Image (tube, grey):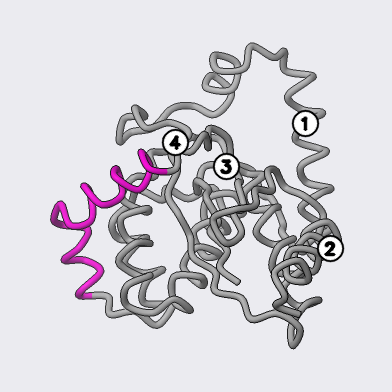
Amino acid sequence: MKIDYVSDIACPWCAVGLNALELALQQVQGEIDIDLEFQPFELNPDMPPEGENADAYLARKYGRPPEERQAMAVTLRARGAEVGFSFGPRHHVWNTFDAHRLLMWAGEERPDAQRALKHALLLAYHGQGLNPGDPQLLQDLAAQCGLDPERAAAVLGSDDYADAVRERERYWQSLGINSVPSVIIDRKHLIQGGQPADVFARALREIAAGAGLS
């Protein structure tokens, strides 16, 4: 079974959804063979390299008052805790395009390293408030995930994978994907949002049974 996880590092619900999906995959381990690949999506493709203050950005984009944003943050932290993701303070919103380029390279190098890098990026951004557009941070995270740091630096210092990332983003958008996380199973079934692990596991079992995979 092929799972495409369409998401952005800047999306907090993508962190919740991925951790929930990982728990679901543990539930179906031994029942269903899974090929998980991460696909790019940018919530803020026009975000400048210097980023933007998070409060100003959220107020401008969603128009919600501070108390409503605070309530949403409490809900998000609680949902994260349920699936083992710890949200920390995040005061800035950053551009994520280079992180997507690095993820695409990592996927070509080793799918397991791409998976580890995706988790590392989400933790750096949402857990530690770090800038996923910082070349040094990206190089360090690549090395931590077992990838060649010199090759990672070469990718980041070039335009490698830029066209490929944009083409992949356009592809998913052409299929109607305009919010994330979006989980596409075998290019036929769509599950959207940071669903609980049991919802993912039940859907995977139902789809596998319908396809004769389990």
Q: Which residue is mark 3?
A: 11
Q: Secondary structure at mark 4?
A: helix
The residue depicted at 58 percent of the width and 59 percent of the height is 123
Q: Alpha carbon of mark 1 to alpha carbon of mark 2: how far?
A: 27 Å
Q: Are marks 3 and 4 in contact (CB under 8 Å)?
A: no
Q: Residue at x 66, y 49 (%)?
A: 88
| Image quadrant in which the C terminus is located | bottom right
Pointer 2 residue: 202
Residue at mark 4 = 173
Asked if the magenta segment contains residue 166, the reply would be yes
Q: Tag 3: residue type?
A: Cys
Residue name at image x 73 percent, y 70 percent:
208
- Please name the amino acid that badge 2 sits on: Arg
Position above or below: 126 against 67 = below
Q: How crowded is the residue under tag 3: few (<14 C-alpha within 10 Å), some, or many (20+)? A: some
Amino acid type at image mark 4: Gln
Front label number (4 vs 1) = 4
Q: Nearer the viewer, mark 1 or mark 2?
A: 2
Question: Marks 3 and 1, how far apart in space?
Answer: 14 Å
